């Protein structure tokens, strides 16, 4: 009996059927399709970063002249919304707060001013200058270098702040009953950075 795979001769070589590997077919990607995917990815990353930034910062545009020459109308600034979640309001901070004034739509008007008095401080305006706890302040940021008018000495209540604009000639601030002291829960954030105009980009003090 003979079998098909039996070697029949010493010099006879077995016959092998060569196995040809199957070639994988790779689908050619459209360059335009790939570019679209990369663009969508970049947009998604940018949106995610923007959402994260807006959790901590709020963009704001300055509309009035009360903070000249530190800030001007149409300056584009960023508020740190969490600045006072991790720290306390300090003398000289520039803050945005909801005032008792009303805007054109009847809502509370937001104002931007500089913190001059902390809780427990005494503030008095006389001789075209501001006196804090009996000491005359040196304020190089004040436009024209003077604070017009005079006010009686007041003590800043606990949990509230005394604020003034840098342009004291036109600023409506804590010197007036319309604004008065600013409660902590009305402060929206601290101005930390100016983005526009580009010539003045940088931190704000």
Image (cartoon, rainbow, N blue to C red):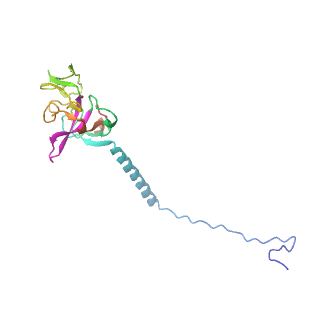
Report which quarter residue 162 is drawn in.
top left
Task: Give how far across and how far down residue 134 sits, in percent.
Answer: 20, 19
> Which residue occupies 87% across, 73% down?
9
Q: Nearer the viewer, residue 91 or 37?
A: 91
Task: Report the side of 57 relative to 112 (left or right).
Answer: right
Principal secondary structure, stretch drawn in magenta: strand
Indicate the quadrant where residue 19 lies: bottom right
Image: 108 above or below 133: below
Q: Nearer the viewer, residue 204 or 96?
A: 96
How many numbered discs sit on the rendered protein? Answer: 0
Tell which residue pokes out farthest to the bottom in this image. 1
Task: Tell me the quadrant of the picture where the C terminus can be found.
Answer: top left
Picture coordinates of residue 64 (x, y %)?
18, 38
Residue 99 in the magenta stretch? The answer is yes
From the viewer's side, name the closer residue of 117 and 64. 117
Q: Nearer the viewer, residue 108 or 70?
A: 108
The x, y position of residue 68, in whole percent, is 21, 33
Q: Position of residue 58 (x, y in %)?
A: 29, 43
Q: Is residue 17 left or right of residue 66?
A: right
Q: Which residues are magenta?
A: 94-118
Please name the residue shown 59% across and 65% down the image: 24
**Can you say whether 100 is above or below 148 in the image?**
below
- Magenta-span inclusion, residue 188: no
Could you tell me which quadrant the N terminus lies in?
bottom right
Inspect this view and state whether residue 69 appears. Answer: no
Is any atom of residue 17 visible in this view?
yes
Q: Is residue 190 found left or right of 127 in the rendered image? A: right
């Amino acid at each position: 009996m003979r079998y098909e795979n039996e070697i029949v001769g010493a010099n006879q070589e077995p016959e092998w059927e060569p196995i040809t590997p199957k070639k994988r077919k790779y689908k050619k990607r459209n360059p335009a399709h790939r570019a679209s995917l990369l663009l969508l990815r970049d947009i998604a990353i940018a949106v995610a970063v923007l959402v994260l930034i807006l959790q901590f910062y709020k963009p704001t545009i300055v509309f009035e002249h009360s903070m000249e020459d530190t800030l001007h109308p149409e300056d584009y600034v960023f508020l740190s919304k969490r600045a006072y979640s991790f720290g306390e309001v300090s003398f000289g901070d520039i803050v945005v707060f909801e005032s008792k004034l009303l805007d054109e739509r009847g809502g509370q008007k937001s104002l931007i001013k500089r913190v001059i008095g902390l809780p427990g401080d005494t503030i008095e305006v006389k001789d075209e200058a501001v006196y804090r706890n009996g000491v005359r302040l040196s304020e190089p940021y004040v436009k024209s270098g003077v604070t017009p008018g005079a006010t009686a000495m007041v003590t800043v209540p606990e949990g509230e702040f005394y604020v003034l604009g840098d342009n004291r000639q036109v600023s409506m601030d804590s010197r007036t009953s319309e604004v008065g002291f600013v409660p902590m829960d009305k402060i929206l954030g601290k101005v930390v950075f100016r983005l526009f105009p580009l010539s003045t980009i940088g931190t704000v003090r």
